[in-house]
Amino acid sequence: MRLAFSTLGVPGMSIPEVARLASENGFHGVELRAHPEEPVHPGLSLNERVELVEEFKAADVSILTVAGYAKVAAPGDDEPVLAEIRALLELARDIGARYVRVFPGGGEGSTARADARAVRRLSAAAALAAGMGPRVLLETHDSHPTGGDVARLLDSVGVGPVGALWDVMHTWRGEEDPAESLRHLAPHLGYVQVKDIAAAEKTAPLPPGAGVLPLAEVVELLSRSGWDGWLCWEYEKRWYPEAPELPALLPSVREHLLRLLAAAA
């Protein structure tokens, strides 16, 4: 398995700094948060996109994902959601990212209606992605936190340009066993986000191995199934300013993930 980390953990850090951090700490790739307040977003000019590609190419680091915020199950018209996904796909295509991350965002209304909106929009997103290259991944998150929730949508869309991003924290908080999560998500799985937290209601990021998430079990299940994708460490300091700075933790993050992989081999 290959290792990546998310720039959610390093708010405001420049692209050269992110590329250097990944390279110096032995990470194969990065998940780039795509937001107007970040250095990476759909408003980048062509020249800025080229410069970004060259920066990561020089560091020999892959751009795993453009982590967007489109909400495929949210109430409202389809077109603004699809326009947002289209812009994210164009950015991902231009910078060589493998994936575009989207959220469910179904809110507190009817689950059936949220599902219908999500399936309709994901089907349209699949058609967009098929012509561009990057794959759209729906994260286990918010209104659809478990593998069963996300698979219920993706099974209706089909396997192909749209898939799943397994955020282990959300499936665990949704009281879904890791083996059940993998069973639901395996046909659609793009990659896996990992982190550590103190408890279901205490989600501030902890150093690797200091929390309660079943990361060893998840890695063992993935290894046993023959899956050979990406593990991405997510460290959300942006929303938890009291958390330690990620750069100092990256060596121990890598060592911890490598230990889990060695134990599962």
Image: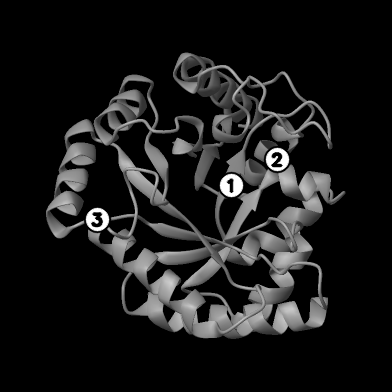
**Scheme of image coloration:** one colour
Q: Where is residue 254 drawn, in percent x and y?
A: 50, 23
Residue 24 sits above or below residue 54 on the image: above
The quadrant holding residue 118 is bottom right
Specify few, some or many for label 1: CA neighbours under 10 Å numbering under 14, 14-19, or 20 or more. many
Front residue of this view, candidates 218 and 85: 85
| Mark 2 or mark 1, whichever is nearer to me | 1
Real-space CA distance between mark 2 and mark 1, rounded to the nearest whole angstrom: 9 Å
Residue density around tag 3, few if under 14, some if 14–19, many if 20 or more, within 10 Å: some
Looking at the rendered structure, which numbered label has been put on residue 218?
2
User: Which amino acid, mark 3?
Assistant: Leu
Q: Is residue 226 left or right of residue 143?
A: left
* N-term-proximal mark, 2 vs 1: 1
* Image spot of residue 145 (x, y percent): 75, 57
Label located before the other in sequence (3 or 2):
3
- Determine the CA span between mark 3 and mark 1: 27 Å
Residue drawn at (30%, 67%) of the image: 90
**Cβ–Cβ under 8 Å for marks 2 and 1:** yes
